[in-house]
Amino acid sequence: MSATGYDHPFIKTLLMFIRAHDSSGAWETMPDEAIMAPFIMTKAQRREIPLFGDPDPDILWRLDQYFNAIAMAVENRSGVAVAPIMKIHHEGWGRMLLTAGKLVAVNNYVRELHRWSFDSVEDMITKAEKIIEEGVATIAKFPEVAAA
């Protein structure tokens, strides 16, 4: 993991959302790399995780924080309020929606949630930027629906 990835605005926003949940102050002094470590796994590490049972609540929480950061980025770039909606089946699949007004700006399917992670911080940024750009473009295409 390169240090430059941690300077990206998306990662800074994600870290802000994560640290906002720290009621004891333990994450205040923790390095960014340590906080982001649960988001990063190799393919071999992912294969070791069984797909049986309900997804780990920590993974659901990380997914929620990830899409909160994406929603904030879409909101900042478009100037329109964006809200995330998560609907996940207990078997580990579902979808994340980002809504703006009456517009579904992003409809992102999630599967194999038990193994949800990224190869690197840079990979996370690349995937997040793609979703952010999709949301901003959809809002720009249908501004009257997003404003409703």
Image (cartoon, rainbow, N blue to C red):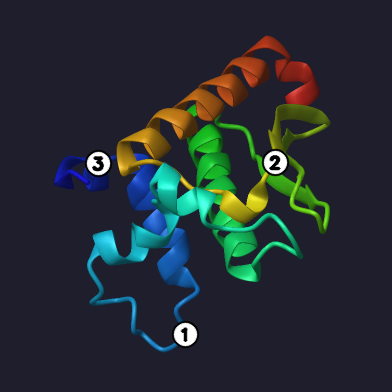
- Camera-near label (3 vs 2) is 2
Percent across and percent down for residue 103 are 79, 27
Q: Position of residue 118 (x, y in %)?
A: 44, 43
Camera-side residue of 91 and 23: 91
Q: Which mark is residue 83?
A: none
Q: Earlier in the sequence, mark 2 or mark 1?
A: 1
- Residue name at image x 22 percent, y 67 percent: 31
Q: Secondary structure at mark 1?
A: loop
Label located before the other in sequence (3 or 1) = 3
The amino acid on which the numbered mark 1 sits, given as a three-letter code, is: Ser
The Cα–Cα distance between marks 3 and 2, rounded to whole angstroms, is 26 Å
Secondary structure of residue under mark 3: helix
In the picture, which quadrant includes the C terminus? Answer: top right
The residues bearing labels 3 and 1 have C-alpha atoms spaced at a distance of 26 Å
**44 relative to 2 in the view: left or right:** right
* Image location of residue 55, percent across then percent down: 69, 62
Q: Which residue is mark 2?
A: 111
User: Is residue 104 left or right of 41 when viewed as pictured?
Assistant: right
Is residue 148 among what the camera can see? no
- Residue 19 can be seen, yes or no: yes
Disc 3: which residue: 5
